[in-house]
Image (cartoon, rainbow, N blue to C red):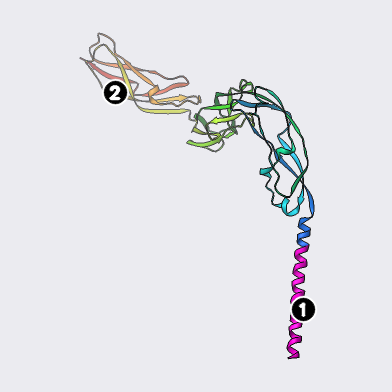
Amino acid sequence: MALNNVKNIFQNKRFLKIFSFFVAVALWLFVTSSRPVMREEHVGVKLILPEDQSILDISSPLEVQLQLQGARIYLQGIQMEYLRPVINLSRPEYLGKTDIEMTLRDSDFFLPFGVTLVEFKPKTFKLRLDKKGSKTVMIRPVYQNKIDDGYKLVEQKLVPSEAVIEGPKELLKNIDVLLTRPIDLHGPKGQGEFTVPLELLGDKIMIKSPTQPEVNFQYDIRPISSNVEFKNVPIRFVFSSTKFHADHSFVNVKAFASNRGEVLSASKIQIVADIPEGQKGDIWVELKSILPPGMQLLELQPSKIFVRVK
């Protein structure tokens, strides 16, 4: 019986020691986390602008340096987004003004429980407002790198070819063109298309259309060929009567084409058979060619045709 009592006392003392250890650790953690510490953060200032106004100029970035104090446990869980001060420029004291000086106060910051704002800077911001406007401008492609040797860009197209931008009217006056990011022409062959981002115009000018700041670049890159051949080009007969019969209605054309970046097709070539008026019977008619600029005739097959005039 006495032995059991001694054993129980020993077990109780061991339990108390373990319990005391955990309590001490918990107290230490609590004291450590509750000790006031300093923390420095940077947050942006959120502006609410009137619907018809845009920021034309600003003295410094809309950012505030905060010095916060509080228990470590509170500071660790703080979300900086909720600390952003909000300035409503639609309030009566700002309406109608173009040059505005904003002053931040402690009350503009919403601090969570257990956190104190020791100091913040800067306290004032100067900005200039302007009437908001919109403008439609052309989109111009910007190229980088050369097309592979032996190839040429025959055709290119941007879809869409125009953009709608929005911002202060004073800035919009000087913008007539919106550029793409550089388009690499080294590599693509044949016909194809790909997406190209637009060059942004800073944080004061917004691209409203297209909704995504990008366009579709369509291209046609073809080999450079000096000699071209067109088959079955129709002959245009010049004669006042239709009472004739020719042994050929189509010809084959071989020509030399300079590199003008044009799309050459049979529809741009005219072959003319001029039948003399008053002529009857069987005759040979020399064919004439009318070619587009940059193309020189090398050969007509046939170069003359047999015509029977009734």
Q: Residues within 10 Å of mark 2 (few under 14, many from 20)?
A: some
**Rendering coords of residue 23 (x, y %):** 75, 67
> The C terminus lies in which quarter of the figure?
top left
Q: Is residue 203 magenta?
A: no
Asked if disc 1 and disc 2 are in contact, CB closer than 8 Å, the reply is no
In this view, 108 is above or below 135: below
In this view, 150 is above or below 169: below
The residue that appears at 73% across and 54% down in the rendered structure is 73
In this view, 138 is above or below 187: above
Mark 2 sits on what residue? 249
- Frontmost residue, 149 versus 42: 42
Using residue 137 as the reference point, say whether residue 70 is left or right of it: right
Is residue 48 visible in the rendered structure shown here? Answer: yes
**Rendering coords of residue 240 (x, y %):** 26, 11
**Rendering coords of residue 169 (x, y %):** 61, 22
Magenta segment: 1-27
Mark 1 sits on what residue? 13
- Frontmost residue, 162 versus 31: 31
Q: Where is residue 200, by image quadrant? A: top right
For the stretch drawn in magenta, the main secondary structure is: helix
Q: Where is residue 177, by image quadrant? A: top right
Q: Which amino acid does label 2 sit on?
A: Ser
The residue that appears at 77% across and 74% down in the rendered structure is 17
Residue lying farthest left?
Answer: 310
Q: What residue type is labelled 1?
A: Lys
